[in-house]
Image (cartoon, rainbow, N blue to C red):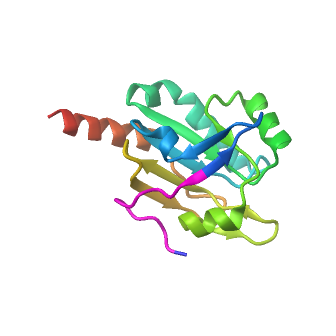
Amino acid sequence: MPVLQPGERFPDLTIALPGGDTLELPGALAGDFAVVLFFRGSWCRYCIGQLRAFQRAKDDLAAVGARVVALSVDDEATTQALIDKYRVGFPVGHSADADAVGDLTGAFVNAEPKHLQSTGFVLSPAGDVLVSVYSSGAIGRLVPEDVVGMVGRLREQAAA
């Protein structure tokens, strides 16, 4: 399974959201820079830390025009509980098919228990991959400060 390289289009991926809605990536984020986060599950303290960091950075991300979406294999009830407990304001998808997502994106998949390893993408407004960050374990993940800095710099360059 090849990893997604800068310049490649992010693959079409349907994310199930709590409450029955879906989000079609990358189309639903078109026109904005986007961050797509795959996380191990609500049981992973490092993942919770990452989600909370992106939530805390919501104003800085909005200022540079970057939107965030996250996804895990957790079921709908567990995902809704995570959203409620940590007051996550961006879309968090549930019930991901880890193998299918891994095949599409190159994300590492843990065999037992089955889950996606931490993976992060920054997408252009056209849905192309700008950055891909793959982790084979609990640590090594995208952080909001890097996203804000990079997207801000890209916007400055485009305006010059």
Q: Residue furthest bottom?
A: 1
Instruction: Pinpoint residue 54: horizontal percent, then vertical percent.
Output: 56, 36
Q: Main secondary structure of the magenta part?
A: loop
Q: Is residue 147 above or below residue 72?
A: above
Q: 64 or 48: nearer the eye? A: 64
Residue 86 included in the magenta stretch of the image: no
Q: Quadrant of the N terminus?
A: bottom right
**Left or right side of 33 for 90:** right
Q: Residue furthest right?
A: 77
Judging depth in this view, the residue of 52 and 66 nearest the camera is: 66
Residue 87, position in %: x, y?
70, 27
Viewer-proximal residue among 134 and 25: 25
Chain part drawn in magenta: 2-13
Q: Locate the C terminus and report the quarter of the image it occupies.
A: top left
Residue at (48, 39) in percent of width and height: 29
Q: Is residue 135 left or right of residue 127?
A: right
Q: How many numbered badges does the structure rendering display?
A: 0
Asked if residue 12 is among those painted magenta in the image, a careful observer would answer yes
Q: Position of residue 155 (x, y in %)?
A: 27, 35
Residue at 77% across, 33% down: 19
Q: Position of residue 58 (x, y in %)?
A: 52, 28
Q: Quadrant of residue 53?
A: top right
Residue at horizontal 19%, vertical 32%?
Answer: 159
